[in-house]
Image (cartoon, rainbow, N blue to C red):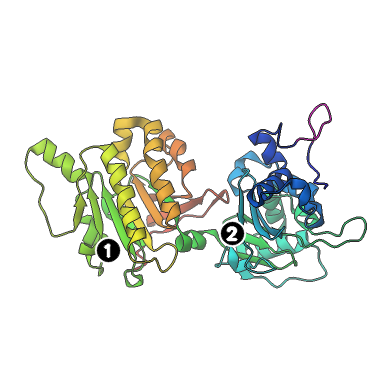
Amino acid sequence: MTNDCPRTEDGSRMGSEDATATEIRTCPSVAIVEQIADESGISPLELPPLNDTIDADALSQLLGDTDESASDARPTVVFTYANHRVCVTADGQVTLSSPDATEISVVDEWTHVSIVETSDEADVATRTVSAVAEHSGRDLERVQSAIGNVVDIDAIARLGEDRGNGASRSGATVLFSVLGYDVVVESNGTIAVGSTLKRLKQTGGNVLIAGVVPDALTDVASANLLGDPERGRRHVFALLDRDDTVVPARLGSTDETAARVVDYAAASRSAASAQPSADDGSAVTDRPADLDELGAAIETQIETLVTGTPLCEPGEIRLCVDSLRPVLDQRGAEGTIAFLEPIFDSIRDASGLAHYVLPVDRDDPVVRTLESLFDATIELRVSESGPEQRWHLHESNYTTDWFALTSVQ
């Protein structure tokens, strides 16, 4: 069996016995073959050559080092090999599943993208640049440069090129994000493009809301992320320094008693005043006494929603954490990261959409320390034109222009 990969300094081939995690990331073909062999209970030598399916050199080049500033936007490669659907990313993660069909469809990964009609006579690189330019409204030179910082577009084309002996390869589908857009290049040459922001709203993720603005404006940004009240979203509110009147204010016509409220702020107020907090009728599910209990309570409420009535669609579960200031005050940046990570995992496992309020300017060092953890940051301000927002989409290393902050309900 032949699966090309880099060699060590003494010229020996890197395999399972001497490969570190870093080495596996630079030699994805070895990781893929060994993982499939291990799952199948056979020797890697019993599998067909991976190089017959895709160009292993092109795969290594595509998933290798790119511009560090765009590291989060590195591509995902999906293909069928040895009766497995293989999904491999540049961070070394290889996911195997049973193929649903012989071809990998665009909608298997990103249903929000749409196919772009391009000239069949142009090569893959030219057609991809043209497709992104058409959607983004940017000039071809700017798009070509941005894509070059994210992926090796020529390597994408080589994945499915015929072998030197003329034998054909089935190739792979490649997904990546650039300039605020998601791009899919299928093995048959079809190219599809869609808004990264739209995907995030559809399928979920973790969003930071930053900026020193009046609470009323934060309420608007939060309400927009809580979703259309008519879509049957399931809501969890974690209130750290806001009272539970924000629940009906943000949910609008939705029955606020259906929301699960984890009210750490109420426990803090009660401890400070030695008097119980007022109950305005909102469904307070839990009043944790400390931050450890708070984190556990949030995870429990998410898990309860997941294990209850089956979810109908991604993004159905919506979490609001308002705000992160008490966590930062008590535990600092590193402690806040430790607090957030298990909540992030719970949201991603549930394909939910969570947002976390931090009433601090985005140029504050603490925001810059934390925001790389999030899928996006919504920056708020009040300018001469009125309340404004702009989105920083970290996966595609892209920032929108400032635009009006208005309610979408």
Q: Residue furthest top?
A: 10
Q: Please name the residue that numbered disc 1 is placed on.
A: 251
* The quadrant where residue 171 appears: bottom right
Q: CA distance from mark 1 to mark 2?
A: 29 Å
Q: Secondary structure at mark 2?
A: strand
Question: At x 26% / y 40%, what residue is drawn?
Answer: 293
* Residue 74 location (% of width, % of height): 63, 48
First to last magenta residue range = 7-14
Where is residue 115 drawn, in percent x and y? 65, 71
Residue 33, percent from left and from top: 71, 48
**Amino acid type at image mark 1:** Leu
Q: Is residue 356 magenta?
A: no
Can I make out residue 220 in this image?
A: no
Q: Is 323 situated left or right of 59 in this image? A: left
Above or below residue 249? Residue 266 is above
**Residue 292 percent location from the top left of the image:** 29, 37
Residue occupied by mark 2: 181
Main structural element of the magenta stretch: helix, strand or loop?
A: loop
Is 315 positioned to the left or the right of 84 in the image? left
Which of 156/166 is in front?
A: 166
In the image, 40 versus 162, the foreground residue is 40
Name of the residue lying farthest toward the front = 41
On the rendered structure, is 264 left or right of 224? left
Q: Pick whichever, 111 or 248, lies toward us.
A: 111
Residue 163 sits in quarter? bottom right
The kind of secondary structure element at disc 1 is helix
Can residue 354 be seen here? The reply is yes
